[in-house]
Amino acid sequence: MNKSVVIILSDLALDLGSKIKDAIPQSELHAMNLNHPDVDCAYGNFSSHIADLFKNKYTIIAVCSAGIVIRSLAKLLKNKIEESPVIVVSNDGRYVIPILGAHSGGNKISHNISHRINAEAVITNMSDLRLGIALDDPPDGYILGNHKYIKSIASRILNGEEVKSLPNLPWFNNSHLKINEKAKLSIDITIKDKISDEDKIIYHPQRLALGVGTIKGASFDSLLKLVETTLKKNNLSKHSIALLATIDLKENEDAINQLAEFYNLPIIYYTKDDLNKVLSKIENPSQEVFDAVGCYSVSEASSILAAGDNSNLIVNKQKYNGTTCAVAISENIILNANNKLDRGKLSIVGLGPGTSSWRSIEATRLLEQATDIVGFDVYIKLLDYDKSKNYHSFEIGQEEERAMKSIELASNDKNVALVCSGDPGIYAMASIVFEMIEFGPDLWKNIEIITAPGISAVQAAAARVGAPIGNDFCTISLSDLMTTQQVILNRVKAAAEADFIIALYNPSSKLRKTLIKKALNIIRDHRKKETPIVIAHSVGRKDEKIEFTTISDIETDTIDMMTLLIIGSSKTRSYFNNSREQKVYTPRGYNVLKGEKNR
């Protein structure tokens, strides 16, 4: 089934939207101009947003009037068979109305929603109302083989025509179809590649699991040709294939992923140990395959596993141009397609300077969803302890160890939050994670990564004292763990010469006391002695301390790794307000008092 989105227009519909989202597995809640922990996406324009969702074949459940939905989508309506369901829920939650794609899942979803929110599903299709069944919308696990004749056959049945017999399927039990062994119309359920005609309806049960394997870099065309040839040779319908299956080493193999997209099927991945468990059922065990990936079969073994207990291999391994496939049949409909190996999730979360009031809604939501939290011990202590989560603390300087732990957990399907102070992309963990994944095993590239921004230290410090970074500024880290001192000093010199406001991160540590002095000496060559400097220590935390000084008077003995310096440009100014609080700012380049623009 397509991905589903519940879309609302205001916070007044938030509670109803959340209830509907809970009724639909793996759905998202989108809201107009609303940031809230329950909202997955905030959008700006309803018409353009719902049109984009429709174009991308999302199932849409809109809490609003039907009119605005119809006007937004009218120009996009072309082929009802290819269109995804669009459902309208009245703002008071009383009615659920499938307005598009009723027989593409819309009616089923509407009934599901109505039961969950105690509403009435308004079904308008004649076949549903008079026959008690929608012949072009079979239950999950069954696919209508051909839509060409279904409309005319449904019309004939509505006009009283009979059918020869009904398949042994509960779906037909409550239908109002009339049976006559001598009737022309027939209904058949088969995995065979039979063709519907003007007197016959064919449904294909999804009982087949297609196992596939490839050499690295095999072409999609070769794999597709092999599969299509295999299905035709064995008279099997593509509609009866419920899923693809392969070894987990092939998660990023383009040919397999393209095949799944071509047939619109999920993929289940198995480890080599899983595949070896069904060795006794394999028709063609291969030492060559074992030497390559550690198991004796990929396509046959994965198809058997995917088809479940008591399954049978009905097509043994077929080979063509570096690709293989096999087909197994299940005793029952395969409805466990969502049992595929879920991608792990790694959220790199910026906590901001420390105080929770400066933490983004997204960051809070990701922390709540995480099963495992990884980070520097000091940062983890900034969080409220939750005994349902696993915490992995590290000492300062163990950046690579933190990143590695996060990646390993996520690659094992955990929902991981790697926490950083400030913003995770500014002298923090995000770049380390992405570098490791780029050069790590292909399996890591399957991890879903979210970078949740945070208020950086320079933003927090600037906000405390006024607007010192009100014009062009740069940030430079004085940590020489990953960058040489000479490169750092070259950057300081360039920034000073260009008259940037300069924010110095990691200015000093127990083992690094002289670099900050060298940097300040370089800056002094390009600044007036009265240039303001802000010394910000642990901004947003209990031991916050803000000091003001100048380039000529600064003392570095008490400056440490928890300190940030903001060094003004030649235009930066400071003054005291009436409460004797010092304020620092850098003009935007406008002379406000004289009303002149100085660009």
Image (cartoon, rainbow, N blue to C red):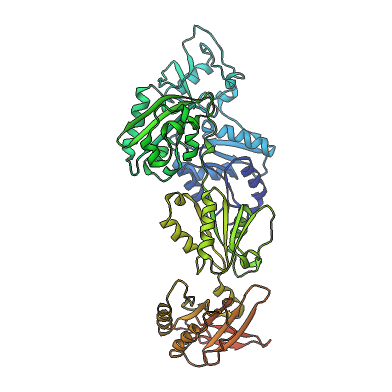
- Pinpoint residue 384: horizontal percent, then vertical percent: 69, 61
- Pinpoint residue 595: horizontal percent, then vertical percent: 50, 84
* In this rendering, position of residue 22 left or right of residue 263: right
- The residue closer to the viewer here, 535 or 176, is 535
Query: Residue drawn 34% across and 23% down?
Result: 233
* In this rendering, position of residue 345 left or right of residue 234: right
- Pinpoint residue 221: horizontal percent, then vertical percent: 31, 37
Which of the image's four quarters has the C terminus? bottom left
Q: Is residue 126 visible?
A: yes
- The residue closer to the viewer here, 324 or 193, is 324
Vertical arrangement, residue 84 with respect to residue 183, above or below: below
For the image, the number of numbered tags is: 0
* The furthest residue to the left: 321
* The furthest residue to the top: 182
- Pinpoint residue 491: horizontal percent, then vertical percent: 41, 79
Q: In which quarter of the image is residue 467?
A: bottom right
- The residue closer to the viewer here, 587 or 228, is 228
Q: Is residue 80 visible?
A: no
Vertical arrangement, residue 425 with respect to residue 596, above or below: above
Query: Residue drawn 46% across and 51% down?
Result: 444
Vertical arrangement, residue 133 with respect to residue 336, above or below: above
